[in-house]
Image (spheres, rainbow, N blue to C red):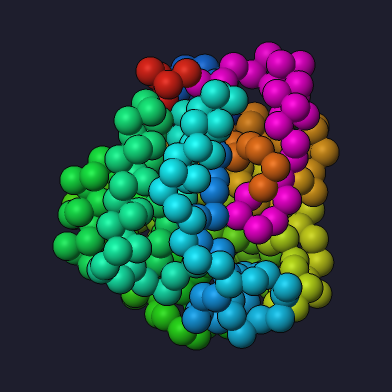
Amino acid sequence: MELRHDWKLAEVRALHDLPLLELTYRAQTIHREAFGDNAVQLCSLLSVKTGGCPEDCGYCPQAARHHTGVKAEKLMPVNEVLASARQARDAGATRFCMGAAWREVKDGPQFDAVLDMVRGVRAMGMEACCTLGMLSDDQARRLKEAGLSAYNHNLDTSEEKYGDIISTRTYQDRLDTLQSVRDAGIHVCSGGIIGMGESVDDRCQLLITLANQPEHPESVPVNALVPVKGTPLAEQKQVQPIELVRMIATARILMPKAMVRLSAGRMQMNQEAQLLCMMAGANSIFFGDKLLTTGNPEYQADMALLQQAGVRPLQPNEARP
């Protein structure tokens, strides 16, 4: 299995546009070679600090300048976060992700509390992932010392499209954060969102930027926009499930060993579409009743779907990067 870092737009677009059954066949073949099974990692995501973000990301209900009804809240107490983590672990999660609506990490009591959250989650035997905005090399080092497994910092879209979605930080800012994470020895979790008015070339270029990094991200979340009233992207049409399948399959082919995570937008999909995404190479889902501030399918429905399809949840001792 070849790991490449020199993908060009024309060849990636040709893959993305293959007849769907051919595309999913190729992706599933690569997936089987890389992972050898159809197991799926269950992840739980908690918003530990909601709302009040100074950024202007056009898709996000947590931006302070958007009138979405999301109220700014303080950072959750460490004990409450760890209680949620324990509940997620008992329900089968092997990865617990903590998101804070910050532009960047600031040293002080709040960051110290996040470090305590990371230590607590790791002590439960789960992978710990954070998404806290931009961070410095020293902050990345401290997160690594606390035991952080992965840091999520999505590129969102292509560099060409990026300026239409966000103006308060640059694409290079995002790439610099990924480099700080990688330099600290923390696994990189980075993906994007489709359905924001981007072209298919933009979608392919996003995947190329990720795949052509010196090392492939260990984790690639693929999100479909969930339009939220009050955000600039509130009127965008819902992404068709087949578009998400194509994106997942292409990501699997470009980054064979990554955990491709079926993330936001899953609630808008029927069960068959979700299974097709897994066939195309998605081997991780977020479960529970919330995905940050947007809805996610109920836990019982998720478990019933996996059982009916014969998809085995990964166990803690076999969880992958």
Q: Could one spot residue 194 in this view of the protein?
A: yes
The answer to whether 148 appears left or right of 16 in the picture is left
Q: Could one spot residue 208 in this view of the protein?
A: no
Q: Could you tell me residue 284's position as x and y percent?
A: 55, 34
174 or 79, which lies in front? 79
Q: Could you tell me residue 272's position as x and y percent?
A: 80, 32
* Relative height, residue 219 to residue 154 (above, below): above
Q: Could you tell me residue 210's position as x and y percent?
A: 40, 56
* Relative height, residue 153 to residue 94 (above, below): below
Q: Could you tell me residue 310's position as x and y percent?
A: 68, 14
The answer to whether 263 appears left or right of 268 in the picture is left
Looking at the image, which residue is at 71% across and 81% down?
Answer: 67
Residue interval drawn in magenta: 291-314
Query: Is 303 a magenta residue?
Result: yes
1 or 134, which lies in front? 134
Query: Is 110 a magenta residue?
Result: no
The answer to whether 86 appears left or right of 22 in the picture is left
11 or 240, which lies in front? 240
Quadrant location of the N terminus in the rendered image = top left
* Number of callouts: 0
Looking at the image, which residue is at 54% across and 59% down?
Answer: 192
Quadrant location of the C terminus in the rendered image = top left
Looking at the image, which residue is at 41% across and 48% down?
Answer: 78
Looking at the image, which residue is at 48% across and 56% down?
Answer: 76
* Relative height, residue 222 to residue 54 (above, below): above
